[in-house]
Amino acid sequence: MGSDRSLEHDRIADRVTISYPGDLSDWGRFQVEKPSFRAFLRKTRDVAEPGETWEEFVGVGCCGNTLDVPLRVEATVGGSRIGPETDIEYTVREACGLEGSWRVQSAGGPRRA
């Protein structure tokens, strides 16, 4: 006989809440909130466990810089498995020093050794 947690692990989630850092740029937010990115997560992630962090590549900006975003699973409803009908919603968490704007490519951006 399995525990309630193991049963939940086998069920498809109705909803998964994922957070991104508060310092994610407007462009980055636009990328992760697009229906196509939500579909990508549904296809590439099998299970969502609260507290788990996924480093996801969200694209190459107009200046050619890549942006990897730490997405954290905040909650699941109905189960832990991700399926084609799982609703993915976002919330914002504390900033983490993410450097993913046009400044990465500009003279005013971070210096590389």
Image: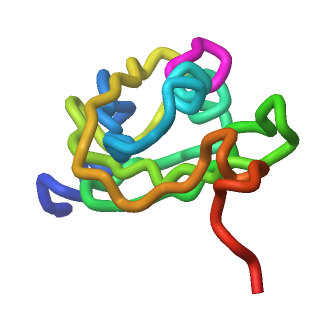
At 19% from the left edge and 62% from the top edge, which residue is drawn?
Answer: 2
The answer to whether residue 88 is magenta is no
Query: Residue 7's x, y, as percent?
Result: 24, 49
Nearer to us in this view, 96 or 104: 104
At 83% from the left edge and 37% from the top edge, which residue is drawn?
Answer: 63
What segment carries the magenta color?
33-37
Residue 53 is drawn in which quadrant?
Answer: bottom left
Task: Give the residue furthest to the bottom.
Answer: 113
Nearer to us in this view, 110 or 52: 110
Q: Is residue 50 left or right of residue 1?
A: right
Query: Residue 84's x, y, as percent?
Result: 55, 20
Nearer to us in this view, 82 or 19: 19
Q: Is residue 3 left or right of residue 55?
A: left
Residue 12 is drawn in which quadrant?
Answer: top left
Q: Is residue 77 left or right of residue 10?
A: left
At 34% from the left edge and 38% from the top edge, which residue is drawn?
Answer: 18
Residue 27 is drawn in which quadrant?
Answer: top right
Query: Residue 43's x, y, as percent?
Result: 66, 33
Tell me the colour scheme of the image: rainbow
